[in-house]
Amino acid sequence: MTMPAQPHSTDGSMYEHIGGAVVVSAVVDRLYTLIDEDVLLRRYFARVDMTRQKRHMVALLSQVLGGPRQYKGRDLAEAHRSLGISGEHYEQVGNYLLAALLIVQAPHDVIDAVTEVLAGQRDQIVGASGPSHTGDGGSGTAAVVWPPEVG
Ligand code: HEM
């Protein structure tokens, strides 16, 4: 996955500014709490190992912010390919991530960097092959609710 280049030293990095590992994990925990409270989004994660998911998201966020950890999970396009994620759901997950960052008073450079990554990754994540895919990758207006409620 292509990510903005970051210095190897974490000193003076956005990662340090935000509060390092403890705060990055708190942000990721908050993100998945918000997702879990959202009936339209939680369905996607019904069968997902959330411990592993959080670990991957912590590594990804750490990498984006110039921290010591590097994301070694699947390519984002591959990980999301079969999920049929709508543009609307993508925006909402992005909003929750930004909200979680704002709650810990993340500085503007962090918000800007994450906003940029969100815009850059959108095409990798939205669309794919679920029934709600409309072909424009972002209308979010499909009538079919996907994925179906589980359990
Ligand atoms: C906002 C940008 C997003 C980022 C940066 C992101 C990041 C990630 C990462 C790092 C993984 C782990 C991949 C792996 O295990 O190898 C993942 C998996 C996953 N993501 Fe996202 N994601 C985003 C948006 C979304 C959205 C909008 C949804 C659904 C509404 C979603 C649903 C999932 C699911 C269900 C998995 C697990 C897939 C599986 O294990 O097979 N993601 N995502």
Image (tube, grey):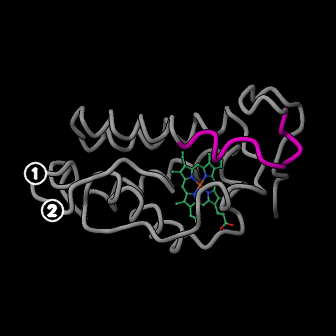
Task: Return the x and y of residue 59 as percentages of the image width and height.
Answer: 39, 65
Look at 55% across and 43% down and name the residue there. 121
Most foreground residue, 26 or 109: 109
Q: Amino acid at mark 2?
A: Ser
Q: Quadrant of the image for the C terminus?
A: bottom right
Q: SS of the residue at dot 1? A: loop
123 inside magenta stretch:
yes
Task: Return the x and y of residue 48 as percentages of the image width and height.
Answer: 65, 69
In the figure, 70 relative to 98: above or below?
below
Q: Which residue is mark 1?
A: 12
In the figure, 55 relative to 43: above or below?
below
Q: Which residue is mark 2?
A: 9
Look at 76% across and 54% down and name the residue there. 83
Picture quadrant of ligand 1:
bottom right
66 inside magenta stretch:
no
What type of secondary structure mainly makes up the magenta span? loop
Residue segment shown in magenta: 121-134
Q: Is residue 52 left or right of residue 17?
A: right
